[in-house]
Structures are given as C-alpha cells and as structure tokens.
Image (spheres, grey):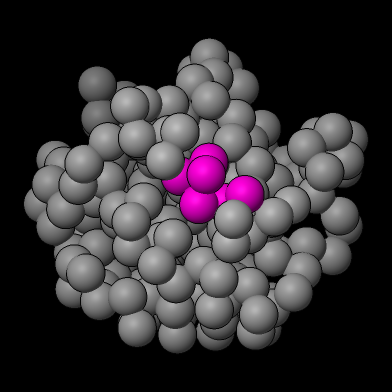
C-alpha cells in the first residue's frame, strides 16, 4: 500500500542533492556479489557523458559498498547517492523519487523491489533471471535483458532517459499489473 502512494517528493530530492531536472536511476540491493552493481558501474561513466543530468540512487549496504563508493568518487563525482541500509518504511519515498529502477541480480527468486517499483508507477529494467519476468514484462512494464548485456542496459537506460512518455506508459501499466495480478491478499 505505501508504494501505491509513493510520490516524487521535491523536499527529499533536495535533501539528497537531486535537482528537479535530474534523471534518477535507482537500485535497491545489498552491495554483494551477483547483485549487478559491477554491470551498472561499467556503463555509468559513459551514460553520464550522454546524459549530464543523471544521478544514481543506490539504496542498501554490504561488504562491496566501499569499493563502489571509491569508483563513484573517481568516475562519477557528485552523481551517486549512497543511502546505506534504510528502514523498510523509508523505501517507498526513495523509490518515489526514482525515474527508473534497475534490478540486475543474476540469481534471486522474486525481488521485492520489482513489485514495489511497479506499484509506485516506475518502469523497471531487469535481468531475465528467476522470477524477474513475472514483473518485468519486456516492452510493457519495462525492459527485460539477458544477464550481463551491458550494451542493451545502456541503450535502454538512454531510451528511458530521453522518453518521459514511455516511462509514464510503463509506469501506468506496471501499477495496473501489481493491482490486478499481485495484490497483497494474493501474495500473502
């Protein structure tokens, strides 16, 4: 329910250093092997050159976080926000300020962040592993990619960065999918 009411909060954006015209790529995941941070950071500097008003909002903590913080300082100064681990009640507000959520895990049943993002009306880009295709319906709620396909990941992020109408269409369809097929009562 809190995700269905998640809004783009200008005060939270300002607190995190995100300008109104910034495009926010979000990721909610532990900084751990097989979660896809390597793939995101492999394309991030090139993507940042193409789209200068780009921010990465990285929610989570883990043993690899210091490594990615160093990479961000070196290659993406001022473009990465690391929130650390946040209480579950704060996640809807963070997803609410994202423009797209990426889920790049290579092994996971059904990540909670996918239905959370869709319920918030956000498009998703996910690797086609395990349960991701139940939520990320390619060309309908976002883009489903072959795991490790960083070129398509970059292409699809660029496409969404420049096409607000497509983001809105995916977000609307994603919200409908969650309401129709994955209501809380059914999931419990």
Main secondary structure found in the magenta portion? helix
Q: Is 39 displayed left or right of 72 in the figure?
A: left
User: What percent of the width, then of the height, locates residue 138?
Assistant: 31, 75
Where residue 65 sits, quadrant-wise, is top left
Instruction: Name which residue lies at 55% across and 71% down.
Output: 45
- When the figure is inspected, residue 136 is found, relative to residue 112, above or below; the finding is below
Stretch in magenta? 68-73
Task: Specify whether 161 is left or right of 118.
Answer: right
Q: Quadrant of the C terminus?
A: top left
Count the labels in the image.
Answer: 0
**Residue 150, image x and y in percent?**
32, 75
Q: Which of these two is toward me, 85 or 88?
A: 85
Query: What residue sits 58% from the left and 62% below the top?
Result: 75
Q: Residue at x 65, y 84 (%)?
A: 50
Query: Nearest the camera: 91 or 14?
Result: 14
Q: Position of residue 67 (x, y in %)?
A: 42, 40
Rendered residue at 56%/76% (across/down): 47
Whether residue 45 can be seen here: yes
Quick one: 153 or 70, which is closer to the camera? 70
Q: Is residue 135 above or below residue 183?
A: below
Q: Is residue 186 left or right of residue 115?
A: left
* Image coordinates for residue 119, horizontal then vertical, percent: 50, 45
Q: Splitting the image into 4 quarters, where does residue 99 fall?
A: bottom right
Q: Tell me if residue 140 can be seen.
A: no
33 w.r.t. 56: above or below: above
| For residue 39, above or below residue 63 | below
Quarter of the image where one finds residue 149: bottom left
Name the one closer to the observer, 113 or 102: 102
Q: Is residue 42 magenta?
A: no
């Amino acid at each position: 329910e809190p995700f269905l009411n998640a809004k783009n909060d200008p005060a939270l954006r300002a607190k995190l250093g995100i300008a109104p015209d910034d495009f926010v790529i979000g990721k909610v995941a532990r900084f751990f092997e097989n979660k896809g941070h390597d793939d995101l950071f492999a394309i991030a500097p090139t993507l940042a050159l193409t789209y200068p008003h780009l921010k990465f909002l990285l929610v989570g903590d883990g043993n690899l976080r210091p490594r990615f913080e160093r990479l961000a300082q070196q290659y993406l100064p001022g473009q990465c926000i690391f929130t650390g681990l946040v209480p579950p009640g704060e996640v809807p507000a963070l997803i609410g300020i994202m423009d797209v959520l990426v889920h790049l895990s290579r092994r996971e049943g059904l990540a909670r962040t996918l239905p959370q993002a869709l319920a918030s009306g956000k498009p998703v880009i996910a690797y086609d592993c395990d349960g991701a295709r139940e939520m990320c319906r390619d060309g309908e709620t976002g883009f489903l990619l072959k795991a490790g396909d960083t070129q398509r990941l970059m292409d699809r992020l660029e496409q969404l960065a420049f096409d607000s109408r497509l983001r809105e269409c995916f977000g609307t369809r994603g919200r409908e999918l969650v309401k129709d097929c994955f209501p809380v009562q059914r999931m419990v």
